[in-house]
């Protein structure tokens, strides 16, 4: 998994930077932290890093993919089902 992730970073990061897709880059870096140490995602420093990594928008204006990425990370941090968290995020206004 880490080999594929590193390969993805090497190949895709220059393209993502050229497209100003820094949110995707931040997400991949956070996933790498999760892959390196799954227990680290429940720590306060990781949770703070995630909170500062994503711009908060009204649920009606948020990109559904960004919301889903955030929900996946949050499900790992809170040890809760992703479906439950996604519904919470969609309902937020």
Image (spheres, rainbow, N blue to C red):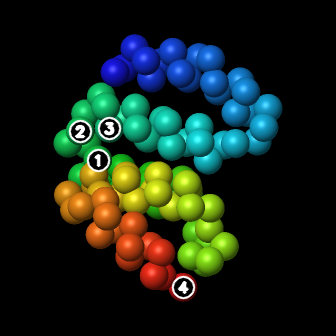
| Quarter containing the N terminus | top left
Disc marking residue 34: 3
**Mark closer to the chain start, 4 or 2:** 2
Task: Looking at the picture, tell me which residue is in the foreground, 46 or 89.
Answer: 89
Q: Which residue is mark 2?
A: 38
Q: Which residue is mark 1?
A: 41
Disc marking residue 86: none
Task: Looking at the picture, tell me which residue is in the foreground, 83 or 57.
Answer: 83
Say which residue appears at 45% left-offset and 23% top-offset. Answer: 5
The secondary element bearing badge 1 is classed as helix
Q: CA distance from mark 4 to mark 1?
A: 26 Å
Say which residue appears at 30% left-offset and 28% top-offset. Answer: 36
Q: Which residue is mark 4?
A: 93
Q: Position of residue 12 (x, y in %)?
A: 63, 24
The secondary element bearing badge 4 is classed as loop
**Mark closer to the chain start, 4 or 1:** 1
């Amino acid at each position: 998994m880490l080999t594929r992730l590193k390969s993805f970073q090497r190949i895709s990061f220059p393209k993502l930077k050229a497209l100003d897709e820094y949110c995707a880059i931040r997400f991949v870096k956070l996933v790498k932290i999760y892959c390196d140490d799954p227990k680290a995602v429940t720590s306060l420093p990781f949770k703070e890093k995630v909170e500062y990594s994503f711009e908060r928008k009204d649920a009606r204006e948020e990109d559904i993919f960004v919301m889903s990425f955030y929900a996946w990370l949050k499900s790992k941090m809170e040890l809760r089902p992703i479906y439950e968290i996604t519904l919470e995020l969609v309902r937020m206004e």
